[in-house]
Image (spheres, rainbow, N blue to C red):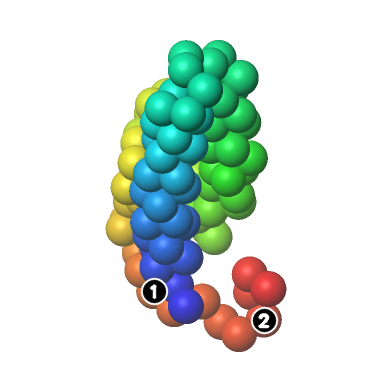
């Protein structure tokens, strides 16, 4: 599976985790009333689920595929903005685990 496909799968997984976090806050709010603890738990859930994002780097230059300059965006680049490497190419079997 290409680096781009794995990064895109991570982006879709984050959409599901975001829905779960919002659902957690809404359910706790409906059952117990307003709770900052539920909000904090949702934030921690999102931070923990998003840590694998830091491993999606270009195989040639090491630039992260989710970064556009200093900004982090929701969807990965298909082509590296630093070196021009096609990130959607298949990786060799022994690269990337």
Quadrant including the C terminus: bottom right
Q: Earlier in the sequence, mark 2 or mark 1?
A: 1
User: 73 or 67, which is in the foreground?
Assistant: 73
Q: Residue at x 44, y 72 (%)?
A: 2
Instruction: Using the image, determine if residue 93 lies above or below residue 49.
Output: below
Could you say where residue 72 lies in the image, as x and y percent from the top left?
41, 32
Instruction: Using the image, determine if residue 38 lies above or below residue 81.
Output: above
Q: For numbered disc 2, what is the local secondary structure? A: loop
In the rendered image, which quarter is residue 67 located in? top left
Could you say where residue 56 lies in the image, as x and y percent from the top left?
53, 53
Q: Residue at x 32, y 47 (%)?
A: 75
In the drawing, does residue 81 fall left or right of residue 14? left
Furthest toward the front, the residue is 31
Instruction: Using the image, determine if residue 2 lies above or below residue 62.
Output: below
The residue that mark 1 highlights is 89
Q: Residue at x 40, y 52 (%)?
A: 16
Could you say where residue 62 lies in the image, as x and y percent from the top left?
56, 48
User: 50 or 92, which is in the foreground?
Assistant: 50
Q: Residue at x 53, y 16 (%)?
A: 35
In the drawing, does residue 75 fall left or right of residue 20? left
The residue that mark 2 highlights is 94
Residue 36 appearing in the image: yes
How packed mark 2 is, by other alpha carbons closer than 10 Å (few <14, some 14-19, many 20 or more), is few
Residue 55 badge: none
Q: Are marks 2 and 1 in contact (CB under 8 Å)?
A: no
Residue 62 appearing in the image: no
Could you say where residue 30 lies in the image, as x and y percent from the top left?
41, 27
């Amino acid at each position: 599976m290409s680096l781009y496909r794995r990064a895109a799968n991570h982006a879709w997984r984050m959409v599901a985790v975001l829905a779960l976090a919002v659902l957690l806050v809404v359910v706790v709010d409906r059952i117990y009333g307003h709770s900052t603890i539920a909000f904090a738990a949702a934030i921690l859930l999102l931070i923990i689920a998003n840590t694998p994002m830091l491993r999606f780097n270009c195989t040639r230059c090491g630039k992260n595929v989710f970064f556009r300059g200093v900004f982090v965006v929701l969807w990965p680049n298909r082509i590296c903005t630093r070196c021009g490497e096609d990130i959607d190419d298949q990786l060799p079997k022994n690269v990337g685990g």
